[in-house]
Amino acid sequence: MSVFEQKPAGGIAPETDRADVAKRLGADAEAAVWYIGIGAILAFLYVPIGVLVAYSFNASRSLSWPMTGFTFDWYAKLAQNEQLIEATWNSLYVASFATALTLVIGVPAALALDQIDFPGKGVFRKLVLLPIALPGIITGISMLTMFRLFGFNLSLGTVIIGHATALLAVVVTQVYARLQRVPRSYAEASSDLGANGLQTLFLITLPNIRSAVIGAGLLSFTLSFDEIPVTFFLTGRDNTLPMYIWSTLRRGITPEINAVGALIVAASAILILISAVLLRDRSSAR
Amino acid sequence: MTEIVRIENLSKHFGDVVGVDQLSLSIRAGEFVTLLGPSGCGKSTLLRMIGGFEEPTQGRIRLDGQDVTHLPPNKRAVNMVFQDYALFPHMTVGRNVGYGLRVAGVPKAEIEARAREALTLVGLAEKYDARPHEMSGGQRQRVALARALVRQPKVLLLDEPLSALDANLREAMQVELRHLHQKVGLTFIMVTHDQNEALAMADRVLVMRDGRVVQDGTPEDLYDRPASPYVAGFVGTTNLFPSAVVDGRIDCFGQQLALPEGLAGRKNGLFGFRPEKARLLQPARKGGSNVISGSVEEVIYHGGAARIVVQLGQGSILVDLQNRKLNGRASLPGPGDILAVEIEPDAIMAFNAEAAE
């Protein structure tokens, strides 16, 4: 049997092949569009960060293309910049205490909203959540006025209070939303099995909202860490990191700033990893 | 037997809505009592008041002689199996079961021993270290049972415990729950809206309606001697028809039926009979004392039984044929066939006109 003889019998095959090819090409084209779209979104999000990190290792002082060489000089310079190091510590200090304070107030507030019926509860909830819609500048000015009125000296302490106030709504929203999803029967079963209110709180309720509390804490920390408007009004002589960067930017973008930025990106990545690890057993239990 | 639960004149109002209405009740130790009724009849509210999750508007609840009306759930020697089981997702099965002992300050070694014992009781000894989300619905149900039993309550409350299970598993669990009840000898109070479940499991069934108990009796009482058309209709299926009594005979949609001797003195009212009490007449036989006939409107085939809707002109009745007891017929009747059925006088139930509502 020769190749030619086979042709008529398989006459239809090339047709269907072509249709298949067309269909496949269509599918490929569709997939390609999707991938380009997804790629564009990711590029939009991450190219600026990539540029920042890349230029933090650039040998030249100017932000020009092509890059001239690889260096750790800027990081070395950072390590000697006392102002910047102090600002970083200040930021970590403020973010840690603001987060702790807002959690200490926010988690019980969310619990109260969820579990206790009291007169004016609806109004209380709206009032707690309102500051989330309030521009930081308003929070800053109003707190500044108040601190002045009561004769407080501006310091990192006032910044912490200001941040905690602004972040409270974030924590309450997140924790309250999670509490709403925890079945009522858990607390009832706990009580039924002989637990008192505190035992139910610590053994049942809090473990079931753990991930929301951790998530709210991390978010608060990040928001506090790079907060400028409220800090601007409430800080005394102490500078936080974003304030310091902002003030040095007036002299142009320096490679040191890029290096700081790259370090913050690295620190954020580590935080995200830590939270992922902390929340892992929880999410698999769901 | 001694009384373990005593409920006196108990009411619960939710705003204007009456959940439970001046209900009194006594439950003896070791009974398996079922609260049966449609949703909104107050059965769950009653159970939750016994558990301590709802505060009664008025009335008293006594548990083993002690007034517990206003005690919180953690101060009552009753335990509940929740409808959604309410297993704590962040704890292993063993720690779930041991929870009630842990919060009571029982030493660790004893907690584990008793938790393992309770899990063995429900046949899940090997699941001590499993997580609730790794288990099937039936297994979770049993963990919830073990957790409630580990504290050795005086009364075990079960809130629609089988409703989340699929049909096959539900039947198996009915049997298991009954065995468990016999094994532990505790008082069980179960809420259900499923009459089959109530009949199959309980020693005593309380049929509830609008916050009140409308009948309190054994499953046989309920089925064979329903106190009202409501119970007759809710527990099983009943052909109901209003009729005048003339010469000891009643009128079922235009056809005559004789009343049994015991009911001879009845006045006009509602009468009825169960669909399975009607027997298919042999095709050869004609007439008979208590025979009604009509044309088949519809046949609903259930495998073991078939339900036939028979049109009688002024109304229709249901006839259940069990196990193909066709009495000489070659096959099930089909729509349009003329069917004659015999109803034994003893099968006739009578209700007072005022009970008919």
Image (cartoon, helix red, strand yellow):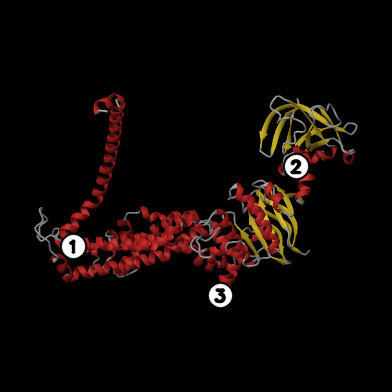
Both marks 3 and 1 on one chain: no
Q: Amino acid at mark 1?
A: Ala
- Chain letter belonging to callout 1: A
Q: A177 above or below A200?
A: above
> Disc 1 vs disc 2: which is toward the camera?
2
- Residue drawn 74% across and 55% down? B203
- Residue drawn 68% across and 56% down? B178
- Chain letter belonging to callout 3: B
**CA gap, disc 3 to disc 1?**
56 Å
| Residue A242 or residue B331, whichever sits in front | B331
Q: Residues within 10 Å of mark 3 (few under 14, many from 20)?
A: few
Quarter assignment of residue B343: top right
Disc on res. B232: 2
SS category of the residue bearing label 2: helix
Q: Is residue B57 visible?
A: no
Hey, which residue is sitting farthest front in the picture?
Answer: A1
**CA gap, disc 3 to disc 2?**
53 Å
- Across and down, in percent, residue A168 comes to 39, 60
Pointer 3 or 2: first along the chain: 3
- Residue drawn 27% across and 43% down? A35
Q: Amino acid at mark 2?
A: Ala
Q: Amino acid at mark 3?
A: Ala
**CA gap, disc 1 to disc 2?**
83 Å
Disc on res. B109: 3
Q: Residues within 10 Å of mark 1 (few under 14, many from 20)?
A: many
> Disc 3 vs disc 1: which is toward the camera?
3
Q: Is residue A103 visible?
A: yes
- Chain letter belonging to callout 2: B
- Residue drawn 53% across and 66% down? B95
